[in-house]
Image (tube, rainbow, N blue to C red):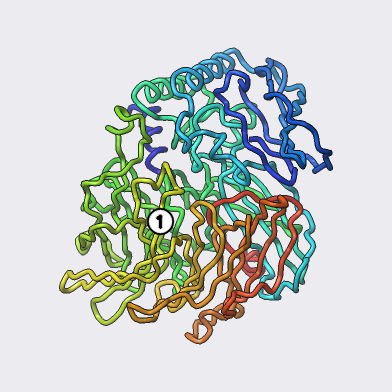
Amino acid sequence: MDAFSSSFLSTLLHPKLLSSTNTKPTMIPSPHTPTFHVSSVRIEEQKPQQKTASPPPPPPQIKPQQPLTKATTTIERTPLASTKVTTTTTRRAEPSLPTTIFNTLDEFINNFIDPPLRSSVDPRHVLADNFSPVDELPPTDCPVIEGNLPSCLDGAYIRNGPNPQYLPRGPYHLFDGDGMLHSLRVSGGRATLCSRFVKTYKYNVERNAGSPIFPNVFSSFNGLTATVARGALSAVRVLSGQFNPANGIGLANTSLAFFGNRLFALGESDLPYTLRLTPDGDIKTIGRHSFDGELFMSMTAHPKTDPDTGETFAFRYGPVPPFLTFFRFNPDGSKQPDVPIFSMTSPSFLHDFAITKKYAIFPEIQIGMNPADMIFGGGSPVGTNPGKVPRIGVIPRYAKDESEMKWFEVPGFNIIHAINAWDEEEDVIVMIAPNILSVEHTLDRTDLVHASVEKVRIDLKTGIVTRFPVSARNMDFGVINPGFVAKKTRYSYLAIGDPMPKISGVVKLDLSGSEHEERTVACRMFGEGCYGGEPFFVAREPGNSHVAAEDDGYVVTYVHDENTGESRYLVMDAKSPSLEIVAAVKLPRRVPYGFHGLFVRESDIRKM
């Protein structure tokens, strides 16, 4: 979700937490507090240990990193919620003189020029509880503690999300973490969990250096002074050879996609990263994928694959014209020529889109590049423009250029995610999407964001746009049966914000009812202190696109119990009015909250 910020960083560079396997994660001490001054901390997982009650210790004292050591810090919570901090050191190569100087300058900026004062960029807040990161986990067997895993779930459910490799040294936004994949491989009723970082260029450079090198693009450029300071430091790091932005600065932390017989980890600020699943359930990063040099700079984290044709449609966006570029891939994964959209006249935060059998639909919302607020207001490079009127753009999905692009003004319609769209009649399009009612809080105060699901009807001939409420409940991360992408859909499964980004349950909506009917036909709440992630629908019979089979399958997700510190993989019957749990897998350690997931069938895994 960071194409704007990363492109902004590239412009600057080119003028042409901690966690353990303990059952309950803890609050991370502030990196700008005088008693907690850390140069860099590597996150390591340790086996959970039983602790006896003890009185709260004094505030942790951690000394700055010494030249020949790498600090490993573990925070553990006792039954009385007191915190124990232990620090061990291991020998590592002495950093070069330039690296030592740059890290010292970075610390000065983080402590004196731009400390994390806002809660949205304060690691103590952003990485609290189950948002705190974990280390990698090799393939580990998991017990099925309830029911049985259906045979149609043989394959891998993989969830992507931000997981910083090192404790942030300054401001940190939720979107800034390195991508980590949590994969549950199922075979013959047995389950194996594996957690691996996406080995991006950024991840590898920083792991080899033993400390953060890249700036956090969503939280590092707050105000003119901080922007100049961090921009100059990043430029010097590039000139000294610490990293080369031409190799990519993305995090691959947002979602996954499978098309052209390849599995990709995606983040819209960079090219996709190809992945491979091994027979034992491990995840390997193959590398950055440019589709034989045809894909330039970046791609959306939400491509759409037509289940009937096998084609995949995608786009990229950025801060310089063309602000939007549309393209597609053939079923074999070969990329087709770009279609630049110059009729989008200002940069907009375009995270998702939708397709029908005939069209691609793009939302231009009130979030976009906001350099004035960044420089003079101390905000993020991405911000809201309340004076802008949102629009919906419609273009034939096989267009060669933008000559047939049509724009429709839709005041107050700001969507981050699209659920689905389809054609009705000859020149009518219907789209389903959660509308963000408090768009000004989208990046800074997600707990204040409320999204209500709407059905939007666009008459391409008359230009009339009609909107109908589907549900006023706060919901997002809506999914459908993947076999019904671009087709008329009756059911959708959405995450309930409590508030966002925490998800307290799943709702099944019937999209076919009349305007004033109750659309909720099933609901599953996870329980007090239990929160999950985006649901994902897995069809019982893959390829069955009969209308009666639309909800014949299962809804899966990870759920974390903050009372016990345990995480589970839940399988729910999509047809049940209560979304009945048919199977639950106890995971060997907690899975942090994250973003988007994907189920890959065993038959598709063999094609990779």
Which image quadrant for residue 456? Answer: bottom left
Q: What kind of residue is marked 1?
A: His
- In the image, farthest residue toward the left: 462
Near-viewer residue (312 or 533) = 533
546 left or right, relative to 408: right
Which image quadrant for residue 4? Answer: top left
Q: Residues within 10 Å of mark 1 (few under 14, many from 20)?
A: many
Q: Position of residue 556 (x, y in %)?
A: 61, 66
Q: Position of residue 447 (x, y in %)?
A: 46, 48
Which image quadrant for residue 81? Answer: top right
Q: Which residue is mark 1?
A: 450
536 left or right, relative to 25: left
Q: Is residue 140 positioned above or below 235 on the image?
A: below
- For image coordinates 63% across by 35% down, the residue present is 17
- For image coordinates 40% across by 63% down, the residue present is 418
117 left or right, relative to 367: right
Secondary structure of the residue carrying numbered label 1: loop
Q: Position of residue 194 (x, y in %)?
A: 71, 53
Q: Is residue 120 positioned above or below 584 on the image?
A: above
- For image coordinates 28% across by 64% down, the residue present is 399
- For image coordinates 45% across by 33% down, the residue present is 118
Q: Position of residue 144 (x, y in %)?
A: 77, 66
Near-viewer residue (162 or 413) = 413
Near-viewer residue (129 or 283) = 129
Near-viewer residue (402 or 369) = 369
Can residue 42 be seen from the camera position used here?
yes
Quarter of the rendering occupied by the C terminus: bottom right
